[in-house]
Amino acid sequence: MTKSNSTEAKTPNKNELSKNDYLCSVKANKMIRYIKQLIKNFNQKGGIFLFLRAQAVSQIAAITDNLLAFITKKIFDISNIKVITLVGHRFEAYVVATLFGQICGGILSCFVNYKWTFKSITLKLKYVIIKFFFVWIGSIALNTYFTFVLTEWLKETSLANTIFGATNPDDIFIFAKLFVSILVGFFWNYIMYKHFVYKDIDFRKTFIRNHR
């Protein structure tokens, strides 16, 4: 009799099971609502969420940029092309690959930022493209120049030969490019996008006010 009572005491009844199921359901619903609100904030709100969206787009553009630059450089290597002449000047193949990646990454960044990151703005796309073009030229110049400087320095170190061998030491450019693109993306691109490219600025009023 005592053993039977002990067994019955350990077996949960239907009410207890229903209560546990209800509590689990409440917790699950709260978690789902929290995740939905977090996604909504990430997609729509400003402040830190705007910064996170901009950084997400920056990383997507950087991946596209670096991937296409690396593939282009490998195509040049397979074709045994080390130097390319453009507009009367000779450039290392990796410099041209860097430039091509920058162009593709820049185009992607411009449209995704306009449609998603800064989507609350009322500025027309054509004005965004004009302003983006000037910022993008600066970004290309900074990325290309400092990637070249850092790559040429790294090529003279044992690191390039250790990783890529003596035949393709300039492949170290992809590491230099990644490092430079992160710095330029934060200290140039994000600041210029937020305060210039995607900001509705009345240049006529600004010009008149500054020349009074």
Image (cartoon, helix red, strand yellow):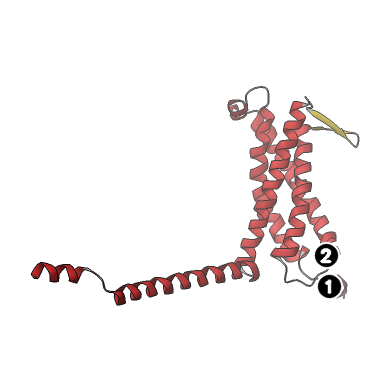
Task: Name the residue that disc number 2 marks.
Answer: 125
Decide: few, some or many residues near mark 1? Use Cα within 10 Å; few <14, some 14-19, many ≥20.
Answer: few
Q: Position of residue 197 (x, y in %)?
A: 78, 63
Q: Residue furthest right?
A: 88
Asked if marks 1 and 2 touch (Cβ < 8 Å), the reply is: no
The three-letter amino acid code for the residue at tag 2 is Leu
Q: Position of residue 185 (x, y in %)?
A: 68, 53
Label 1 sits on residue: 202
Image quadrant where one finds the C terminus: bottom right
The foreground one among 211 and 207 is 207
Residue 150 vertical placement versus 64 (above, below): above
At 90% across and 37% down in the image, what residue appears? 87
Which residue is located at x 13 percent, y 69 percent? 4
In the displayed structure, 196 sits above or below 72; it is below
Provide the secondary structure element on which disc 2 rests: helix
Residue 114 percent across, percent down from the top left: 75, 63
User: Looking at the rendering, which quadrant does residue 149 occupy?
Assistant: top right
Residue 80: x, y in percent?
A: 77, 24
Please name which of the two marks, 1 or 2, marks the residue nearer to the observer.
2
Residue at left offset 85%, top offset 70%: 203
117 left or right of 130 in image: left
Q: Residue furthest left?
A: 1
